[in-house]
Image (cartoon, rainbow, N blue to C red):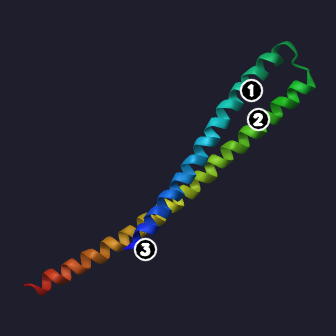
């Protein structure tokens, strides 16, 4: 029994970790979006300012990196959920077969 509980706790911790990573990246993206808005306003008056353009490029790269992290975490989370679903489906089928065998033997 403890093995099942350990598997469940490990699975829950794994999913919670993915969710935490996604939330952190989302928070970072919100901050980057605010910085990009400020940068946009600054560029209105100085569209040829290479420092501001470089800053915008850097901010966009950071935003891209955070969005990539979200995608990677969602893919990993989906894989973990799919594996757990398949494992549970196998258990359900095994129990169904045992039930049918028992029911058949009682007839």
Q: Quadrant of residue 105?
A: bottom left
* Labels 1, 3: front one: 3
Q: Quadrant of the C terminus?
A: bottom left
Dot 3: few (<14), some (14–19), or many (≥20) neighbours within 10 Å?
A: few
Q: Earlier in the sequence, mark 1 or mark 2?
A: 1
Could you tell me residue 58's position as x and y percent?
Answer: 82, 36
User: Helix, strand, or loop for circle 2?
Assistant: helix
Left or right: where 42 falls relative to 85 = right
* Residue drawn at the location 91% of the way across and 20% of the way down: 48
Q: Earlier in the sequence, mark 2 or mark 3?
A: 3
Q: Quadrant of the N terminus?
A: bottom left
* Labels 2, 3: front one: 3
Left or right: where 47 falls relative to 29 = right
* Residue drawn at the location 41% of the way across and 64% of the way down: 85
Q: Quadrant of residue 59?
A: top right
Q: CA distance from mark 1 to mark 3?
A: 49 Å
Q: CA distance from mark 2 to mark 3?
A: 46 Å
Q: Earlier in the sequence, mark 1 or mark 3?
A: 3
Q: Which mark is residue 3?
A: 3
- Does 25 sit above or below residue 43? below
| Residue marked by disc 1 | 36
Dot 1: few (<14), some (14–19), or many (≥20) neighbours within 10 Å?
A: some
- Does 62 sit above or below residue 42? below
Residue furthest to the bottom = 105
């Amino acid at each position: 029994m403890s093995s099942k509980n350990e598997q469940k706790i490990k699975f829950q911790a794994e999913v919670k970790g993915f969710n935490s990573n996604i939330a952190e990246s989302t928070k970072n993206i919100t901050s980057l979006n605010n910085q990009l808005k400020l940068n946009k306003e600054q560029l209105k008056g100085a569209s040829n300012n290479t420092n501001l353009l470089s800053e915008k490029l850097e901010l966009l790269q950071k935003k891209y990196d955070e969005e990539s992290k979200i995608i990677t975490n969602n893919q990993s989370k989906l894989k973990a959920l799919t594996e757990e679903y398949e494992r549970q489906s196998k258990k359900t089928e095994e129990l169904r077969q045992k039930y049918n065998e028992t029911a058949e033997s009682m007839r």
